Image (cartoon, rainbow, N blue to C red):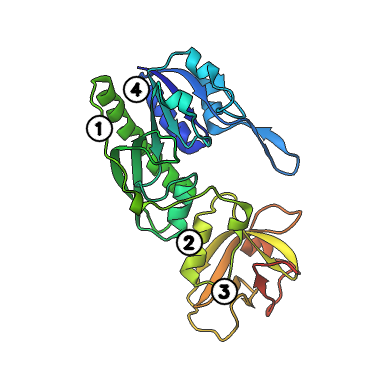
Amino acid sequence: MNIVFMGTPPFAAEILHHLLTHDHQVSLVVTQPDKPVGRKQTLMPSAVKTLALQKGLPLFQPASLKKNHEPVLAVKPDLIVTAAYGQMLPDTLIDPITAINVHGSLLPAYRGGAPIQHALFDGLEETGITIMHMASRMDSGDIIRQARVPILPDDDVASLSHRLSVVGARLLHVVIHDLAQGIDIRKPQNEADATYAYTIKPDDERLDFEQPTQVLINRLRGLSPEPGGFAFIRGQRIKIYGLEKHDIIEHDAAPGTVIDIRKQLLVKTRDGVVAITRLQIPGRRIMDTHDFLNGQTLFRTGDMLTKEGA
């Protein structure tokens, strides 16, 4: 089949790689425009763009696919495959062309742009992959096939995304084979069971130490390895990239209180204590806390980590 592939992050790049290694004909790759990153706002290509350039595939990066999709129609695809592309497809593409999506949840749960992150936020022990027909409403199309994937206790977005992409790529291969044989499975979604996992916004990165320990750890799992979480100490915003549950169970300090800075950076939560294991303060690189504590003056025992700045 003549395939147009649309995707952006590493999750999608893994699926594109699988298509190419199984000799599917990908005539065009569509991905998001390069994104400015860091303090210097350096333009960085998506993982899908990097792979497409390595493989010498034709590439298209519209700012708005709805306004500019003629290059997709020009290659006359038999099939459009999307995976975490980041834009809605217009009806002018999905009406005349079979279009399917590889989605990182067991739909109708976690419709939207961040299903993997929200599954980690919610502390789920299982998620999965859905291959579905595209529809005009977000992630609402008929289900073709699904597969369950366990969430491991130490999973973050990168590790879970990788395992989901491997399962999704294998499932996609089966679906494409079926479609080529004229087998078109369709199972309507139950709208009453739909939940949503909207794209992560900066405010979602806020860490609240008044929450229970596991809720706080799960929040950071869904923000790791990037963008990490943040909190404030004495009005300064710090980035947090690692948290671990500590053995101290009972402590009479208020949630958010720094209770030890000697060999570990320990902070009280609602129902226990966590150790901050990796962090970044303004103007500095990300550091392991053990190295950071040597000579630091920002944290003091009794200080409060808060979710709001001064």
Nearer to us: label 4 or label 1: 1
Please give the name of the residue rendered at 24% of the width and 21% of the height, measured from the top-left corner.
182
Q: Secondary structure at mark 1?
A: loop
Q: Point out the tag, 3 or 4, that comes first from the N-terminus.
A: 4
- Asked where in the image residue 310 lies, by quadrant, the reply is bottom right
168 vs 261, left or right, is left
Give me the residue at 40% from left, 34% from top. Answer: 135
Instruction: Pinpoint residue 158: horizontal percent, then vertical percent.
Output: 48, 46
Type of residue at label 3? Answer: Glu
Question: Sequence order check: which comes first, mark 1 or mark 3?
Answer: 1
* Nearer the camera: disc 3 or disc 4: 3
The residue indicated by pointer 1 is 185
Which residue is denoted by mark 4 in the rendering?
22
Q: Nearer the viewer, mark 2 or mark 1?
A: 1
Q: CA distance from mark 3 to mark 4?
A: 50 Å
Whether tag 2 and tag 1 are in contact, CB under 8 A, the answer is no
Whole-percent x, y for residue 59 in the image: 55, 20
Q: First in sequence, mark 2 or 1: give its number.
A: 1
Q: Are marks 3 and 4 in contact (CB under 8 Å)?
A: no
Question: In the rendered image, which residue does mark 2 sit on?
Answer: 218
Q: Which residue is mark 3?
A: 210
Q: Is residue 37 shown to the viewer in this render?
A: yes
Residue at 74% x, 57% y: name it: 282
Amino acid carrying label 2: it is Asn
| Left/right of residue 41 with respect to residue 199 in the rendered view | right
Q: Report how far apart the C-alphas of labels 2 and 1 lie in the structure.
A: 36 Å
Quote the CA–CA distance across marks 4 and 1.
22 Å
